[in-house]
Structure formats: C-alpha cells, structure tokens
Image (cartoon, helix red, strand yellow):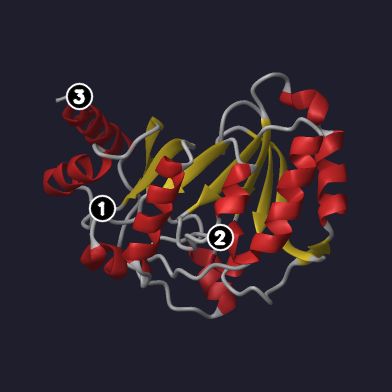
Amino acid sequence: MIGKINSIETMGLVDGPGVRFVVFMQGCPLRCKFCHNPETWKLNGKADNYTPEEIVKKILNYKPYFKRNGGVTFSGGEPLMQKEFLLECLKLCKQNDINTCLDTAGSIPDCEEVLMYTDLVLLDIKGTNKENYKEMTSGNFDNTAKFIKLCEKMNKKLWLRVVIVPGINDTKEYIDELIKFIKPIKNVEKIEFLPYHTLGVHKYEELKIDYPLKDVKDMDQDKCKKLEDMLKEGLKH
C-alpha cells in the first residue's frame, strides 16, 4: 500500500497538543477560497510515495521528543482522501503507543474505522450552513454535518478551528451564527480562530491558478482575537 505525502514537519507546535510529527497528505476535495496549500489539491500532484511502515518508522525516530502529550498529526490536503493508507498508519501508530491526531475538514464522513484509531480530531469549521459553506469551499456542508455526528457518536475529542477572513466572516453576525452552530456539538475541548494570511499567494502564481481573494489583506490579529473572545463568551450563555 502506497500513500502520497506532500511534506513532513518533524517538530510541529500548532497542529495538536505538545510536539507533533505532522504528515501533510496529498489530495483534497474542497477548494477553499483561503487555502494556502493549493499544491496539495490533486491526489496525483507532486508528492513522495511512502508505505505505512515507512512513515511510522520515521515517526518513531522522533518519539523521544513527543514526551507525554505530543504525537503524530495527519493533515493535508484532506487526509481522508487516502483513507485506507491513513488507517494502516494509524493502526501502526497505536501499536507503538503513539498519540494520533487527525486534522480534517470532515468532508469525507464515511470514516468510522479511521476514527477508532484517532485520539483527537482537529476539525476545520468552514461554514455554518449549506450556503456559506458552498461559497467558501465549493463543497457539501452535509458531509461535515455527518462527520460531526459520527464524532459525537464515537465520543471523539474535538478541537475546532476557524479561519477568519476580512470582509467575509469577520462580523458579529457570523460569530452569532457560529455560536448557534457550535453550541450543540459535544466533546469540544478547544476552539481556535486562525487569522487569514496571504503567505500562500505565490504558490497560486507558480501553479498558474487564479487566487480567489486577490484584494483581501491579512486579517488583523487583534480583531481576530476579539472575535474569538466574543464567540467563547457567547458559548457560555
């Protein structure tokens, strides 16, 4: 079994708890307007081939750095695009007592067996209803809704992450919608707002792809933090 891996980060600090070995997998069914990794979209794009055993061998080399609360995070792209390969990697990780984290948009909901071997789900919230989800991602909101229900059913820990984009979802109205959307979700341990940035624009130019947010500036970090505080305050009531 061969997996397509776009890149690897050996000492990640923002993709789950502790020090993480982050595997960025190739392939994604969404086309998010704010995506800064367009090189991961195509499953047959430029990538390195690995077997599950080869990936886990690499992970094991860094296990001494994980300590108690680190581990491996499978990200992308959308790691569930390579579900069978991902499952084998996760099984091998659990055999070696490695904490596992899945960074996903939940766009491929038929993944119960994968979640059985996943300790934590980092779930990207890209919209609160069919309309704004479709506008932001060109994807199907129902898939993410099903994925959330599956995580609840399986009692999976969730960290929710929201990219805040100026002029699109940086308003009180959107925060109010998020509050209504997030409040019923069970097992949410953490919520993070991520300020939109333009660091990936050059990749679109290199790939000769039109960048959908050409005139949008980087999100002000202070405003982003205030909006996050507004959300967390709203969820208390």
Quick check: 232 left or right of 53? left
The residue that label 2 is drawn on is 78
Label drawn at residue 236: 3
Q: Kindly identify the amino acid type of the residue bearing the numbered disc 1.
A: Pro
The image position of residue 151, as x and y in percent, is: 45, 44
**Mark 3 vs 2, N-terminal side:** 2
Q: Quadrant of the C terminus?
A: top left
Q: Tag 1: Cα neighbours inside 10 Å, few (<14), some, or many (≥20)?
A: some
Residue drawn at point x = 38 percent, y = 49 percent = 149
The residue under label 1 is 166
Q: Which of 5 and 156 lies nearest the eye of the viewer?
A: 156
Q: Residue 195, position in %: x, y?
A: 37, 44
Q: Residue furthest bottom?
A: 208
Residue 217 at least partly seen:
yes
Which badge, 1 or 2, comes first in the chain's sequence? 2
Q: Residue at x 43, y 54 (%)?
A: 147
Q: Gap in Å between the C-alphas at discs 3 and 1?
A: 26 Å
In-image side of 141 versus 173 (left or right): right
Q: Secondary structure at mark 3?
A: helix
| Secondary-structure class at tag 2 | loop
Task: Tell me the quarter of the picture where residue 52 sits.
Answer: bottom right
The correct choice, above or below, for 39 with respect to 198 in the image is: below
Circle 2 crowding by C-alpha within 10 Å: few under 14, some 14–19, many from 20: many
Give residue 49's position: percent from left, percent from top.
81, 65
Check the image and report above or below for 15 versus 65: below
Tell me if I can see residue 197 in this picture: no
Q: Disc 3 residue type? A: Lys
Q: Position of residue 161 (x, y in %)?
A: 40, 42
Comparing labels 3 and 1, the label whose residue is closer to the camera: 3
**Horizontal relation, residue 201 to residue 64: left or right:** left
Q: Which of the 4 image quadrants contains residue 101? A: top right
The amino acid type found where label 2 is placed reads Glu
